[in-house]
Image: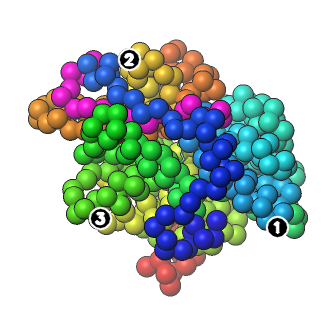
Amino acid sequence: MARHEYDRERFIPIPEEILEIYSTWRPTPLVRAKRLERVLNTPARIYYKNEAVSPPGSHKANAAIAQAYYAKSQGIKRLVTSTTAGQWGSALAFACTFFDLECTVYMPRVNCQQKPYRKNLIESWGGQVHPSPSEHTDIGRKMISEDPNNMGTMATAKSEALDDVLSDDDSRNAVGSIMNFVLATQTVIGEEAKTQLAEDYNDYPDLVVGCVGGGSNFSGIAWPFFRDMVEKKTEMDFLGVESTAAPRLTMGEYLYDHADTSRRSPLFKMYTIGHSFVPPPIHTGGLRVHGSAPSLSIMVKEGIVRPIAYNQVEVFEAASLFSRTEGILTAPETAHAIRGVIDEAKKCKESGEKKVILFNHCGHGLLDLESYVEYNAGRIQENNADPIKVRQAIQHIKDLYPWINK
Ligand SMILES: Cc1ncc(COP(=O)(O)O)c(C=O)c1O
C-alpha cells in the first residue's frame, strides 16, 4: 500500500489472488444509457460503468479486497475502519471473509439508524459494528460526555477507529478513500471502461463524471483518462459532483487539514470545510465528509476537474428518472453523478453537441430504500450546509495552523 501511495511506477500489477476474487464480478458492465438519452432527447451519448454489481453493491469492494490481501500477507489479524453510508464497512467485512481476518467497523449513529440493513450486512459477513460515538474507545466516551446527543459523522467514526487500532498491535486501520493507494486500486474501473468503450462501442469520452466524497470512485474512473489526456495532449473534461450539505470543492478552501476530528491523522493539503464542521444529516452518508483527496483537490485547484454541488431534492429527482429509464435503483451518492450527467446532456440538447459522457455508476440503492420512501412521500429536504458555520470551521483550521494556512 505504501508502494502504491508513494512510488512513481506507472503500473503496479494486481496480484493473482486479488484477480481471482475480482473475477467473480469483474469486469463490471459498461452500459449505454439509451433510454435515459431518449427521455432527455439529447444528442449526447451517455455510458455508465456499473460498479453496483459487486456483492457488497459498490466500487468499495475493489479497494477492500486489495487491503485485506496485503494485510493478510503482512500477518495482520484484524482490520479496523470507519464507514458512513456503510458501503465501505460492508465491502471491508466482505473482503475480510476471503482472508480470514477479523473486521471492526465504526459507523456514525445517524447512519446506523438510517441504514440498519448496511449494519446487518456487515454483521452477516462476520464484522463487528460500533455506532459512533461509542463507549468502546476513549475518544468516543469523551465525545459522548461532551454531547450525549452526538449523532456522529465520518470524522467521529474515523477518530474512534484510530483510537482502537493504536491500542492493538495485531490490527491495522483500513481506509476507504482519500489516500492515493485507495484511489489507485480503484483505477481498475477506468482501465476496464476504456477497453470496453473502445472494443464494444468504438467510442471515447469527452466528459467523465463521478460523485465525490473522499474521491475514490471519481479518481478510479478518471485517472486512466487523465493519463491519456496528459500523454496524448488531448482535451478532456472532468466533472466532480458533491453534496450541498458538505460542499468542500465548491465552498471549501484549499488548506492543510486533518481527516478526523481528534486531529490524529496527518495534515492533508485538500479542499476542506474544516474537520469541526458537522454537515446536516442527509441520506447520502458517503458524501457527508469535510475533505476530499489531495490528488483530486489539486486537480480542482488546477482547473482540471470542474466541481459542482447539488442538494438532496435535485439528486433524488435524478435518481427517480434514472430508475424509471434504466431500471436501476441507484445509491443516493451515485445519484449526484447522475444529476450532473442529466444537466450536461440537457446542455447538449440546447447546443446540439454530440458529446460522449461517461459516468461511474458506483453503487446501488437497494439498501437505501428508506430514503426513497422519504422521497416518494415528498419529505426530502434540501439540507444545505450553513455558510456561516462553514466559514467558522475553516477559520478554526486557519487559527490552529496559521504558519501553513495563511
Ligand atoms: C456508493 C458510494 N459512492 C460514493 C461514495 C463516496 O466515496 P468516494 O468519493 O471515495 O468514492 C461512497 C462512500 O461511501 C459510496 O458508498
Quick one: SS at disc 1?
A: helix
Residue at 50% x, 15% y is: 376
Q: Quadrant of residue 162?
A: bottom right
**SS assignment at label 2:** helix
Is residue 189 in view? yes
User: Which corner quadrant of the figure contains ligand 1?
Assistant: top right
Tell me the number on the disc at residue 245: none
Q: Earlier in the sequence, mark 2 or mark 3?
A: 3
Residue 106 located left or right of residue 292: right
| Residue receiving disc 1 | 166
Cα–Cα gap, marks 2 and 1: 48 Å
Who comes first in sequence, dot 2 or dot 1?
A: 1
Q: Which mark is residue 230?
A: 3
The spot of residue 37 in percent (x, y) is 27, 24
- Between the residue at mark 2 and the residue at mark 3, the CA separation in whole angstroms equals 35 Å
Mark 2 and mark 3 in contact? Answer it, CB < 8 Å.
no
Q: Nearer the viewer, mark 2 or mark 3?
A: 3
Residue 92 drawn at (x, y percent): 71, 46
The segment highlighted magenta reads 39-56
Reading the image, the residue beneath label 2 is: 325
- Closest to the observer: 347 or 276? 347
Q: Farthest residue toward the left?
A: 351
Look at 64% across and 26% down and name the residue there.
Answer: 367
